Image: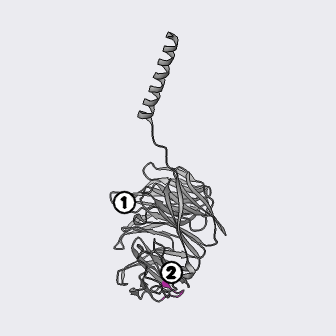
């Protein structure tokens, strides 16, 4: 009897210890994240010009317009699934969330319009427009001079470079131009040079890609060939200094994709092994193994995730990943023309995917 009592007491003690462990030490299991289709819309059924409507079509009120370029068509759609218009590109078009400008091959001027079709400004300068970070620029026919436009379309300033422009990026406070001679030039909102840098170290000098952080404090570039170099500059006091650099295994002789995430915490760039990711705070690198010819879609959920659309031809992959390389989604899609963008805070955790003649919204949800 005494032996049985001891066994029962030990069993009761073990059960009590187990209950205490789960009460004190238990933690919730991580929820699975999945992409859930929300809507799909045909671009072919959209109005063919800004401000146009189809019979019976209502004006879209579904959030801020999002610009898109899908093959030889461009236009705007809203997060709720209204396609405002989809027009033929013609020779070229510059788009931004609040404005667009279509232009001809030999452009002596062009009109800037809102997504609703209202003319915002008329530009008389010759050249080709490009928009970034809420700013509007015109590059001259010689590809070596750049002007920034005021709100009314007039020229705010003009800057002449020593070589043709080969790469560009901007934030609200700084516009950075990479040149064919390998140099980097950063201009402030008045057109004054705040950054002039020549990376060097390569047999062939050229800037193949540049990126500016949202706050303008960091500038990154892929420069040169044989050897190719990755360099990051940081603003310290009044000057930009090299804070990180290394030679790459790549030897691209074409424009290279490189961009900061919207939160400025990471920098993504194209590499032969996938997408290289530079962590700003730790100054460390990792690689997201996706196929070549990838494009960063942006981050969602406060910069926690990164989205890529990769592949060529009719075979594409949509990859949503959390670093260092945890796949949230890896979907195969068939489309010869495609794009991916992430929604803003108002749109929640939404991804918008363009596939040939359709735009699809997918929401990132927990289950």
Measured from the top left, where is residue 309 in percent x and y? Answer: 57, 64
Tag 2's secondary structure? strand
Residue drawn at (35%, 84%) of the image: 152
User: How dense is the environment of label 2, judged by Cα within 10 Å: few (below 14), some, or many (20 and up)?
Assistant: many
- Label 1 – label 2 distance at C-alpha: 35 Å
User: How dense is the environment of label 1, judged by Cα within 10 Å: few (below 14), some, or many (20 and up)?
Assistant: few
**Upstream in the sequence, badge 1 or badge 2?**
2
Marks 1/2 in contact by CB < 8 Å: the verdict is: no
- Front one among 359 and 176: 359
Give the residue at the far top of this rendering. 2
Q: Quadrant of residue 174?
A: bottom left
Q: In this view, does 127 lie above or below 330?
A: below
Measured from the top left, where is residue 250 in percent x and y? Answer: 61, 58
Tag 1's secondary structure? strand
Q: Give the range drawn in magenta.
A: 102-107
- Front one among 124 and 361: 361
Residue drawn at (47%, 26%) of the image: 15
Does residue 201 appear in the picture of this structure?
Answer: no
Q: Is residue 250 above or below residue 39?
A: above
In the rendered structure, does residue 106 fall within the stretch colored magenta? yes
Does residue 335 appear in the picture of this structure?
Answer: yes
Measured from the top left, where is residue 128 in percent x and y? Answer: 48, 82
Measured from the top left, where is residue 197 in percent x and y? Answer: 45, 63
Reading the image, the residue beneath label 2 is 93
**Dot label at residue 3:** none
**Dot label at residue 239:** 1
Q: In which quarter of the image is residue 338?
A: bottom right
- Front one among 302 and 358: 358
- Front one among 347 and 232: 347
* Residue 298 horizontal side relative to residue 217, left or right: right
Q: Is residue 37 above or below residue 68?
A: above
* Residue 128 horizontal side relative to residue 217, left or right: right
């Amino acid at each position: 009897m005494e032996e049985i009592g001891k066994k029962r007491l030990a069993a009761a003690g073990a059960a009590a210890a187990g209950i205490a462990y789960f009460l004190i030490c238990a933690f919730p299991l991580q929820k699975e994240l999945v992409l859930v289709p929300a809507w799909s819309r045909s671009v072919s059924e959209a109005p063919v010009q800004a401000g146009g409507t189809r019979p019976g079509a209502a004006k879209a009120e579904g959030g801020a317009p999002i610009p898109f370029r899908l093959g030889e068509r461009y236009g705007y759609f809203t997060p709720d699934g209204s396609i405002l218009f989809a027009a033929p590109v013609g020779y070229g078009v510059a788009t931004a969330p609040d404005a667009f400008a279509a232009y001809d091959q030999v452009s002596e001027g062009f009109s800037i319009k809102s997504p609703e079709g209202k003319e915002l400004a008329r530009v008389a300068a010759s050249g080709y427009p490009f928009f970034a970070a809420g700013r509007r620029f015109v590059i001259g026919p010689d590809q070596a001079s750049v002007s920034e436009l005021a709100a009314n379309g007039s020229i705010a300033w003009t800057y002449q470079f020593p070589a043709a422009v080969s790469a560009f990026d901007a934030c609200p406070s700084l516009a950075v131009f990479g040149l064919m001679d390998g140099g980097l030039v950063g201009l402030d909102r008045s057109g004054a040079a705040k950054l002039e840098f020549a990376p060097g170290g390569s047999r062939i000098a050229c800037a193949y890609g540049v990126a500016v952080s949202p706050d303008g404090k960091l500038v990154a570039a892929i420069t040169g060939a044989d050897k190719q170099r990755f360099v990051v500059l940081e603003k310290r006091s009044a000057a930009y200094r090299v804070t990180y650099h290394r030679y790459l295994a790549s030897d691209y002789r074409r424009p290279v994709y490189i961009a900061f995430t919207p939160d400025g915490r990471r920098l993504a760039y194209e590499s032969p092994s996938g997408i290289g990711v530079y962590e700003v705070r730790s100054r460390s690198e990792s690689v997201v193994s996706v196929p070549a010819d990838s494009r960063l879609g942006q981050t969602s959920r406060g910069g926690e995730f990164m989205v890529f659309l990769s592949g060529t031809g009719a075979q594409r992959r949509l990859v949503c990943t959390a670093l260092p390389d945890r796949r949230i989604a890896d979907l195969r899609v068939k489309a010869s023309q495609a794009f991916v963008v992430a929604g803003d805070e108002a749109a929640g955790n939404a991804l918008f995917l363009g596939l040939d003649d359709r735009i699809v919204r997918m929401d990132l949800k927990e289950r």
